[in-house]
Image (cartoon, rainbow, N blue to C red):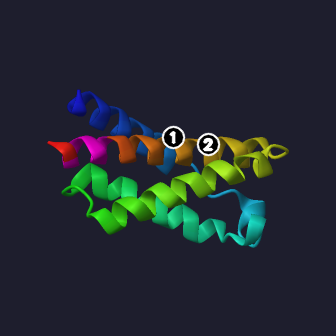
Amino acid sequence: MADEKTDLLACLWDEFSAMRFPTGWYDREPEGTCLVTLDTALVGFAANVLDGPPLGARHREHLRCRIELLAELLPAFGTDSYASRYFVALYRMAVLAEEIDAERGAA
């Protein structure tokens, strides 16, 4: 099962990597959150899950908190279809990375 999920994460990674950060959102900070920093952190965690060992407890908690934060922010992108598609893709990728990492950590 983990191999199938890792393959799915790799596909999501490829799809997401083909997207560009939404142009009008570089300087916006919904609820005081820097979207570029949030994006960078979640992409980094997904890359680590694809290529690295299981996350440590501190990093796993940081990932979980960032996923929750993005989930809260998703409605803010509702009027911008591209930004919405971009951040939903990022969210899906991060959630799957968290799931894979949890399974690896439990093994």
Q: Identify the disc placed on residue 92.
A: 1
Nearest the viewer among 44 and 103 is 103
Q: Residue at x 47, y 50 (%)?
A: 17
Q: Locate residue 44: give its quadrant.
A: bottom left
Nearest the viewer among 65 and 27 is 65
**Residue 32 sits above or below residue 80 on the image:** below
Please state the horizontal and vertical placement of residue 98, each as a whole percent of the image: 38, 47
Q: Residue at x 85, y 45 (%)?
A: 79
Nearest the viewer among 102 and 49 is 102
Q: Residue at x 54, y 48 (%)?
A: 90
Q: Locate residue 47: give its quadrant.
A: bottom left
**Residue 59 sits above or below residue 102 on the image:** below
Asked if the residue at tag 2 contacts the one at tag 1, i.e. Cβ–Cβ closer than 8 Å, the answer is: yes
Q: Identify the disc placed on residue 88.
A: 2
- Residue 102 is a magenta residue: yes
Please state the horizontal and vertical placement of residue 100, each as a whole percent of the image: 30, 42
Crowdedness near tag 2: few (<14), some (14–19) or many (≥20) residues, C-alpha within 10 Å: some
Number of labels in the image equals 2
Magenta segment, which residues? Answer: 100-105
Name of the residue lying farthest toward the right: 79
Q: Identify the disc placed on residue 23.
A: none
